[in-house]
Image: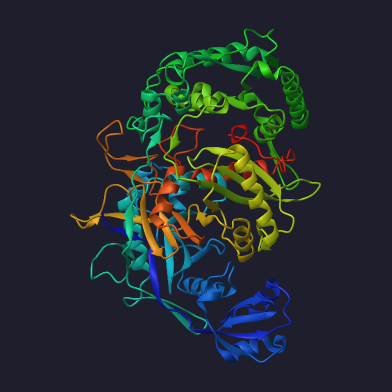
Amino acid sequence: MEPVKLNSIKITKFPASYFQFDTSIKNWKELRETIGNSNIVAGLLKGKVLAIGDANEISKTFGDKILSEVTLQDFSYKYLKRINSVELGLLYEQIMKSLEKQGFKCVSYKRRLFYSPDLKPTEMDFKFAKISDNEIRTNTYEAFEFQLEIIGDDLYLILCPTVYIAIANKNKAKTFYNQIVSNRYNKNVDFKLSMWLRKLKSNNSIKFEYAHSTTVLADNFSYADIGDSTVVDYFNKINKMSEPLLRFNGLDTTYSIEHPLKGLSSFGPFSSSLISNPTVEFLKLSLIAPQKEFGKVERFFKSFEESSNCKSEHNYLLNFTSIIDIFKKRMELPKNTEDNLFSDLTVESQISIEQFYEEMKRRIDQLETIRSKFDLLVIYVPDYWDKFKERKDDNVYFDLHDSIKIYCARKNIKVQFLNDKSMTYFDAARVKWWLSLAMFTKAGGTPWVVDESEHSAFIGLSYSTSKSKKNKVTIGMSQVFDSKGRGARFFLNPINKPIFIGKTPYMSKEDSRRLINSLKEIYFKVDINAELKKLIIHKTTPFIEAEIEGILQATKGIDVELLHIQHYPLWRGIKGDRQKKQPASYPVDRGTTIQLDDNLFLLFTHGNIPSTNFLNQKKDYYKGARGIPAPLKITRYAGKSSLDEIANDIMKLTKMNWNAGELYKTLPVTIDFSKVLSRYSKQDELLLNIPYDFRYFI
């Protein structure tokens, strides 16, 4: 494998201890006012102040707010690893205050985002990003975010280069920020890392001095498997997972390929293989739309029986032949506007969003009376209905799409929304692939599966807090997937006794045990013949002790893997070219794993795919071709599977989102769907304690 340069720098020295004492200070605001401009950093923890600085200055600054003897405490890795660790916060503040002292400007203490007033992007940077706007050019600065991370018995600083655009128009700044960052590729990001290394060095070393203490960094970034004695620090466990195969036949395993669209074109959908001599069937549609738009929608769906050549992503996309040829389906629309499967929704433009929503629900209620006559409800939302799509403020969180999906799920109606963007998109082949796949799946089809992880089930778990004006409820959002990665059920349930650390909710032991028992019951109801030997739980936040205890109590006799999957951490990797001894032209390969310690590793689910026979052209493929990929950071809290086995399962699940025809998603479907559920949980139309087929919500 090629070496990978990481954006991590080992910290070789940091303050060994801090002062601690009881205090009369009640909150962080009072603490900051007490410290003022003194050469001290301090934190507040359970009625105590933790501080770094000179003992005499601390005594003088806090005065009669000190209520006990001032003692000296050693920094402990145990406490540095805690969620929202105050001890780790002291080290953060010591570094940030030092950076400000050196002339760096802090944009956000929360993100630890700094920029240098004398460092601006080069002319080549602006040219490559196609930026000519003078305001942007004048007010854009090189910047970096950083975080501290404990790996094994060492402390690291993770430094991620970025830019800061200092203008008042935040939407404009965001647009151009994305434009710049998305055009910074492997070699350019490596150059920016080296630039910041030089900028931070003073007298050939990187030191942060503040509060009578010093933090010292190594001279260079860490590497993965470089095997070079001149490199100070490297991780020697790096591997690459192969691209998972997708199965399109339940009887013959040779009907397998990595490329989902090629599999559908060559073999047809997986569920068709379970039928002897499958014939073309009708996909019966009902429709809600303004009456004047009926013909437009009708023409659009009839075009799915016609071929379209792809006009983009030529190394991945295929020409679309027809929905009949690929999915063995023919769309059957309402015959005309008099057909009872068509419901006219023509409204006055001045009605309120609440009135519009009620009108929509009335149309759905009418169609419910003839539910047996259609497979799928299509709702066309033209651009001139944009003002009815959402209202989100401090008191209301209303999303038309999500609320309608929930309302229809109660009535056993699966929904496909349609908008003008899809109907006018320049690449009709892409639209037809994506929409026909989604509609086929919602109507009950199974397009493909992955190789079975024997007797295993996967659960995605996350939390959200509803924004109902009446009461705020902490919701546990769960998705159960079978051993082949197929979605089984979505499940929203209230957490009775949430534990909050900061603003983040976690489950109590009792809630954890109750939830897992419910999910096991759901799993066995879906497949009464299932034998469950292993349960893999993916979670979007760390596991706390109470959650671990409750889950393990509910899973006696079952092997359990508890995995925290962090999306978009600050970690980055620069793929090297070993032969040329320089950064490679393409980014880190998809499937690359870098083990940081026994229970922590990085997995690049997004990245370069070298030229292979399952792609259309003999060249590398980097989906989206934007910037460099961020890995998933995966932390194990329980389990005994090999990290390769864990990574392989996650790679499989990145290919199991049937709502789109991409080669893969960055997130495994367990976590990807949790984002969907997070949105739904904020609506007033909640579906608590009832398991639903995932097809209602994709």
Quadrant hosting residue 548: bottom right
Q: Quadrant of the N terminus?
A: bottom left
Residue 189 locus on image (x, y percent): 35, 54
Asked if 512 appears above or below 280 in the picture, the reply is below
In percent of the image, x 59 and y 73: which residue is there? 86
- Indicate the colouring scheme: rainbow
Q: From the viewer's perspective, is 610 left or right of 335?
A: left
- Regarding residue 174, the answer to whether it shows in the image is yes
Asked if 611 appears above or below 638 in the picture, the reply is above
Q: From the viewer's perspective, is 549 left or right of 398?
A: left
- Given residues 444 and 183, the one toward you in this image is 444
Residue 164 locus on image (x, y percent): 48, 55
Asked if 158 appears above or below 431 in the picture, the reply is below
Asked if 604 appears above or below 232 in the picture, the reply is above
- Regarding residue 172, the answer to whether it shows in the image is no
Residue 200 locus on image (x, y percent): 38, 70
In percent of the image, x 61 and y 58: which residue is there? 551
- Given residues 400 and 270, the one toward you in this image is 270
Q: Quadrant of the C terminus?
A: top right
